[in-house]
Image: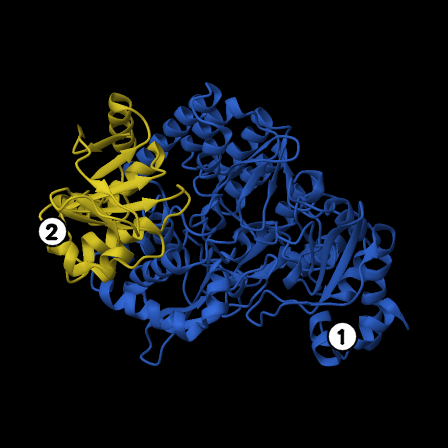
Chain colours: A blue, B yellow
Amino acid sequence: MYRYDDFDRQLVHERTEQFREQVKRRLAGDITEEQFRPLRLMNGVYLQLHAYMLRVAVPYGTLRADQLRQLGMIARVYDKGYGHFTTRQNIQYNWPKLDEIPDALLDLAKVEMHAIQTSGNCIRNTTTDQYAGAAADEIEDPRPYCELIRQWSTFHPEFTYLPRKFKIAVTGSPNDRAAVKVHDIGLRMHQNDAGETGFEVIVGGGLGRTPFVGKTIRDFIGKNDLFSYLEAILRVYNRFGRRDNKYKARIKILVHEEGIDKIRELVEEEWSQIKDGSLRVDDAEIAHYIEQFAPPAFETLADDDADFERHKAENRRFANWVRSNVIEHKQPGYAIANVSLKPIGGIPGDATDTQMELVADLSEKYSFGDVRVTHEQNLVLPHVKKADLFALWTALDADNLGTANLGYVTDIISCPGLDYCALATARSIPLSQRISERFSDLDHQHDIGELKIKISGCINACGHHHVGHIGILGLDKRGKEFYQITLGGDASQDASIGKIAGAGFSEAEVVDAIESLVTKYIDIRDGGERFIDTYRRVGMDPFKEVLYGDR
Amino acid sequence: MAIVKNDSLIEQEWITVDAEGDLPSSDENLIVPLERFKEERDSLLGRNGGLGVQLNPGDAPEDLAEDLDRLSIITVNFPAYTDGRGYSYGRVLRERMGFTGELRAVGDVLRDQILYMHRCGFDSYDLKVEGEVALNKVRAALKEVSVYYQPTGDGRVTAQSLRERRRAALQ
């Protein structure tokens, strides 16, 4: 894992001091809330419904044990004993006090963490595959490039006041777990005809009130040229992106209005002028970063483990957890263990201080001190010996972290919604809890199979409802919450934007509506079809019928 | 209200004129908006006083390619600090087009953006505060951070270059 060197450390410490100074100026009244706003936003401090909220960056979703332990400590000392993992692989604290935030940032800096650029119209935290460096289907570990992007984008002097926020996601696997097609820039590693590994560059994807699947601006860019190419895209966006209307300011609108061909022409023209400049990264430097993310010291093991098999045979709950939450590892004898933060009836993505500390301890014991945060709001221990899985699960399960539902109908993405967020038009957490309770039966969940429900409490779509197999958007109609259902969304390599099924449902009706959709799917599915496959085969009509009948 | 350049307060020696209307006498130093410069280029270049151009958001610095050596100053207007187009104009003017005259940030120029402006090639700042206060703000802003990841044309050594030097020294 990447360790800060003295340069990285110094930068974060200077930033912490700078922010302390800015807070002091704000509290003294030297700057107005209006002037303070962009400064606090650049440090991840939002003003929510009830309090300030601090969003801490987890660069490319990778945490060391000591970092996760510190996040737990911060939850206890500066918050009410919990934190919320987000769809951007970050963590949010909902109740910090403004005058204490500089101290919290200092505590973060001690473990090489920060809240830089987790908000504001700048390049945000770069996200990637939570199984990076572990996945059996990976072409190459994307994290060295993510770290280089982190550095390139941190306090980029030219791109700190963009038209709007800017999100980059990277996948090193053909099976896209990072939703790269719905980001401002998506990078997909692949090999060209010459056998070199590089990136397909996808631009202009995004969710929000105007969702788009991104378009390919360049089929292949070599690793050495990646950063000059990113800079060219950002410069074109900074110069030509719309600034007259905040809702039309993302790069997806520029791409949509000008057309991908025009944008490609501008970017290529810009790139041709800078590609041989100082952003070209040579092989030696890339090798240096690859070295930083070298695989841990795996033991040479047989892929099968007799004890593991025996525990599965003897303990049905463990076997269920393995079935849903354990993923194939590239190294024989090892597995990827997903820690669900979606207990039945729980708040998606929330973890308590002690849960964070437990996972930190377990990662040291079983996973080389390596923990990942997923954009689906779960945690991952990426390198666990199969022989250790039972002990791991037993410890997780004792603290309500052993839920066996990864990818199932109760593994719901949900934004904080009206319980916290100043932008929300409806609550999303209570709805996710009720859906989770409705489908609590594990055998039923397993029978339903992969079904991604994603809930947003407003049109800004932080809960990714547009790319949920079933998406739910909470709106406000004359002071009452109601929920619009979309079907057929997908964030994977087969990305698609869901279609609105019809009129929205009241809070009382919506869980029944979801259940009727699931029942219909079970009735008409073909063989091993997932919900999304069935929807793609039969289309909207059969589902519309169960929702609305003749209405 | 106060202009800071090269760690000093400097006098305002330029008159910034609007896109339309009469021009002051031929001896005065003028800054004209790019649009007007394009329309009245020849007569403007024929005046006795110094000449500068102001870029507003949406302008193309490339339009000045033929005339850069005739301009003593280019001002880039940041009508709101949130409008960051001027940062790109600064880098294009300095790093691509090779402009060596004064590059001044005007408009909503605040302390917390000055370092970024400097990194993008600006060397003077028109602040809305008085004398010493302005000077102190610029000084404080420019020394707040000492680690730079991005290579720009400002001459600051990046963290990457320092790392390479260190690795080379160890070999």
Dot 1 alpha-carbon crowd within 10 angstroms: few under 14, some 14 to 19, many 20 or more: some
Which label number is shown at residue B99?
none
Q: Circle 1 sits in a helix, a strand or a loop, which is it?
A: loop
Instruction: Name which quarter of the figure residue A222 lies in.
Output: bottom left
| Residue A459 percent location from the top left of the image | 65, 54
Which residue lies at the image location 25% right of the left edge and 23% below the top edge?
B131
Q: Quadrant of residue A179?
A: bottom right
Report the residue that reaches farthest toward the top. Answer: A28
Q: Amino acid at mark 2?
A: Arg
Tell me the mark number nearer the camera, choosing from 1 and 2.
2
Residue indicated by mark 2: B47
Task: Identify the subunit bearing mark 2.
Answer: B
Q: Is residue A16 visible?
A: yes
Q: Residue furthest right?
A: A550
| Residue at the (21%, 54%) spot, across then down | B93
Asked if disc 1 and disc 2 are in contact, CB closer than 8 Å, the reply is no
Split into 4 quadrants, where in the image is the N terminus of chain B? top left
From this view, report whether residue A103 is shown above or below residue A333.
Answer: above
Residues at marks 1 and 2, CA–CA distance in whole angstroms: 71 Å
State the residue at coordinates (89%, 70%).
A551
Asked if A264 appears above or below B158 in the picture, the reply is below
Q: Chain of mark 1?
A: A
Q: Label 1 belongs to which residue?
A: A540
Tell whether A273 sits left or right of A302: left
Q: Is residue A330 visible?
A: no
Q: Residues within 10 Å of mark 2 (few under 14, many from 20)?
A: some
* Count of numbered marks: 2
Q: Nearer the viewer, residue A162 or A52?
A: A162
Relative to B50, A352 lies left or right = right
Identify the amino acid type marked 1: Met
Can you give x and y, in whole percent of width and height, for residue A232 in the image? 32, 62
- Where in the figure is residue A450, as x and y percent of width and height? 70, 65
